Amino acid sequence: MSRILSAAPTLVGVTAEATEPTAATPARPPARSGLGVLIGIGVLLAMAIGTGLTVTLAGDVLAALGLPDPGLLTRAGLPATRVLAECAAVVTIGSLLLGAFLVPPQSSGYLAAGGYAALRTALVSAVVWLLAALALVPLSVADAVGRPVTEVLTPAALTGLVPQLAQPSAWMLTAGIALLLVAGCAAALSWGATVGLFGLSLFGLLPVALSGHSSSGGAHDVATNSLIYHLLAASLWVGGLIALLAHLARRGEYAGLVASRFSRLALVCWIVMAASGVANALVRIEPDQLLSTSYGALLLAKLSALVLLGIFGYLHRRGAVDAVARRGDRSAMLRLGGGEILLMLATIGLAVGLSRTPSPVPDTLPGRTEVLLGYDLAGPPTLLRLLFDWRFDLAFGVLAIVLAWLYLAGVRRLRHRGDPWPVGRTIAWLAGCATILVATSSGIGKYSMAMFSVHMGLHMALSMLAPILLVLGGPVLLALRALPPAGAGNPPGAREWLLSAVQSSPVRMMTHPLVVLPLYVGSYYAMYFTGLYDATVASHGAHLAMNAHFLLMGYAFYWPIVGIDPAPRRLPYLGKLGLLLASTPFHAFFGISLMNSSEVIGGDFYRALALPFVPDLLADQQVAGSLAWTTGEIPLVILLLALLVQWARSDEREARRSDRKASADGDADLAAYNAMLAQLSERSTPRR
């Protein structure tokens, strides 16, 4: 990062939207203390809403279902502690967002004063997040088993029950992530470390999201994916606003730049929250149940708050951002943002109450296949069903569409500037995005959860075919040409962030041949021959992580071999060929091992599905092995041809470069070489 930022202009005297002085203006303790009091009131309000709704509704639900009551302490303490944990999480995420991407760092790569202050805030909130997550472990155990929390606060009870229950295990994992954040925030000083901590903080939201109400029942794949989008967008929006107001209150530097950057992010977050909230609601409840059930009433209240927040931001945020950017007037943003924070934190309380309220029972109960997969299957996987029986994947389907749109936007910008971009690269990139979309959203993705053979086809498409096509598209090179540079006197922006990421130590390490080859080929064996697949096959979150791992590892492996983008490590063509050939026998042996295996991988899950068109699980696994063998070799042949073509073109370019140099200097190199030979000949000839 220091090399990129030192190459970029220094951060002194930035553009008009960030020209206000930074060190001459003293901080305003009253504004900071007032913001702290406001956030405290908002957290208490959220805790009151979440606790009140839970205590009121949970008791009636438990009594109606005849379930044991864990006691008032658990019924009231669990939602209050969860509100505290979620508020601490959004403050941590927002503070790290501010330090990583809103406040420019110093040219040396270390955080500026505003970024470091945000990091200190993230440290305090991460400690609160850690303590609240630890407290939620016994509370969620008591809630799950219907016993008072004092009875489960023993080492024997916790060690025996926590691994068996989804929510306590999720909160334990969240506590571990929060502990890493505490240690990282206490030690970090650089921009790169802050970016890594920001990514870790977003990951800390996933364990609980993947184990809640949305992860069970019918359509739990759509519900879980939409909930992940909703939580990430809400955390960035709420946490970013709190961090922005704290930065303005302490008279931090580059206030106009920070406000304008957050304003653009807030609009995207609101759109994502609205779309994901509607998708999640359509899965959980029928339209006629919105007014007739308590769950529907809470959902309407939450959606109304979201609409109010959108209107609030549209009508007032723009003027406040302009006032900060142009005139340095922070008071308007502080006044308007204070009311928005109260509404946001109250919405968190509503969300906690909603998560503690059971959704209405559907008219028809889902069958075994729908409970395990999230959807029903029409029948055996015929060719027509694999191609046209679609179920859109909200995770990787959206990813494929967004990647294609961003790439086309970059190509369009280059063409408007009059700069050419090879059509072949565009075709390769779009074909890679189409491969991801078809593999995850067509019948292939739908049947991959139910049949190991189809799953292996999805695996091969994501780990081999899609990455090869994507690296041939040259997305980094396109982005570097399309994104404008920061310019003299301006802070680094998206182009500089991308350069820093490509040249960072983690990327250099991941693309090292001795690292990426074992990770890429070893993933196949570690996933399917160690029992890891058996333990995770029933988890939707594990499937998301599995697909992401296949795609990223494939991209990291093929990037140094045939990638158009400049890789952090430049390999000679013989090294590229050797790396490619070294992976070939591992692919073949993996497919042969699957075909010859006598033990069914993931057998418990597939036997529980009991699909009538898969009577022999071992035969289906042998088909998967043959697919891994045959389909794995075809992309390798294509890759070898692409590598040989690139090698030949490289030799041609080198020859043309030598010819141009010889024409320019009169073939000075050849003349010097001949003169050297003549001199050596004279020395070797004996004198007469």
Image (cartoon, helix red, strand yellow):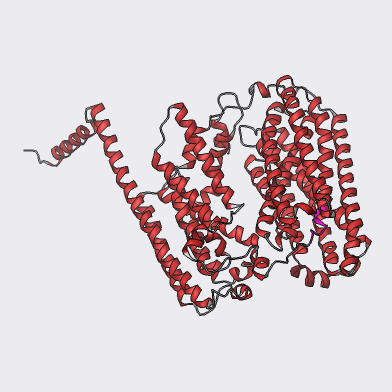
From the image, which quarter does the N terminus lie in?
A: top right
Residue at the outermost top position:
327
Q: Where residue 266 sits: x, y (%)?
A: 70, 37
Q: Quadrant of residue 606?
A: bottom right
Asked if the magenta segment contains residue 492, the reply would be no
Asked if the magenta segment contains residue 357, the reply would be yes
Q: Where residue 418 sits: x, y (%)?
A: 43, 27
Residue at the outermost bottom position:
598
* 305 w.r.t. 329: above or below: below
Left or right of residue 400, residue 169 in this image: right
The magenta segment is: 354-360
**Who's the residue at 78% across and 72% down the image?**
160
Q: How many numbered marks appear?
A: 0
From the image, which quarter does the C terminus lie in?
A: top left
Asked whether 147 or 605 is in front, the reply is 605
**Who's the residue at 50% across and 48% down the image?**
433
